[in-house]
Image (cartoon, grey):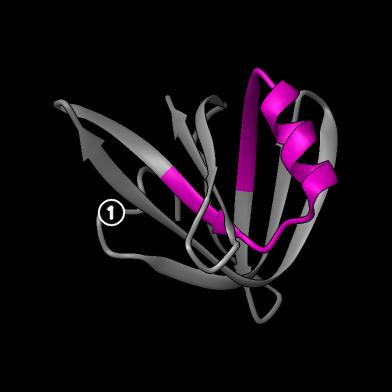
Amino acid sequence: MTGTPGIHPVRGDTIQLIADGTLMIFKGDVMTREVRRDGNGFIEITLPADPQQRRNLERAKGYQFSLYRDGLQFYTTPRSLRVVEIRRASDGALVVTGAP
């Protein structure tokens, strides 16, 4: 599946993310969805991440990712996304917002 994930969360167990040529793999409860703010659409991913991965993503200019569930690719970004915001959710998960 490509395009935008839609407003309903799409959950998986692995995300392979490439940020500025560096591959990062996140395992655990991962999620992506489309969010709208001020009339603009963004793709948001929620990841279990450590502080080093957050630093790597904060330095990145762009990224692409693929979402997997039970070893099958379920969603992939159609093109590179620009990092707009990185924050921590109330449960400690890393939330990355990107723009096409």
- Horizontal side of residue 55 vs 7, given as left or right: right
Q: Residue lying farthest left?
A: 39
Viewer-proximal residue among 26 and 89: 89
Q: Residue lying farthest bottom?
A: 70
- The amino acid marked with disc number 1 is Gly
When the figure is inspected, residue 54 is found, relative to residue 13, above or below; the finding is above
When the figure is inspected, residue 4 is found, relative to residue 9, above or below; the finding is above
The residue located at (79%, 47%) in the rendering is 51
Viewer-proximal residue among 96 and 34: 96
Return the x and y of residue 89 as percentages of the image width and height. Answer: 49, 57
| Residue 56 part of the magenta-drawn span | yes
Q: Residue lying farthest front?
A: 90
Q: Quadrant of residue 14?
A: bottom right
Range covered by the magenta-colored residues: 44-65
When the figure is inspected, residue 76 is found, relative to residue 18, above or below; the finding is below
Quarter of the picture containing the N terminus is bottom left
| Residue 29 part of the magenta-drawn span | no
Q: Quadrant of residue 53?
A: top right
The residue located at (84%, 43%) in the rendering is 52
Q: Residues within 10 Å of mark 1 (few under 14, many from 20)?
A: few
The residue located at (66%, 82%) in the rendering is 70
Return the x and y of residue 67 as percentages of the image width and height. Answer: 59, 60
- Which residue in the protein does label 1 denote? 6
Quarter of the picture containing the C terminus is top left
Viewer-proximal residue among 20 and 49: 49
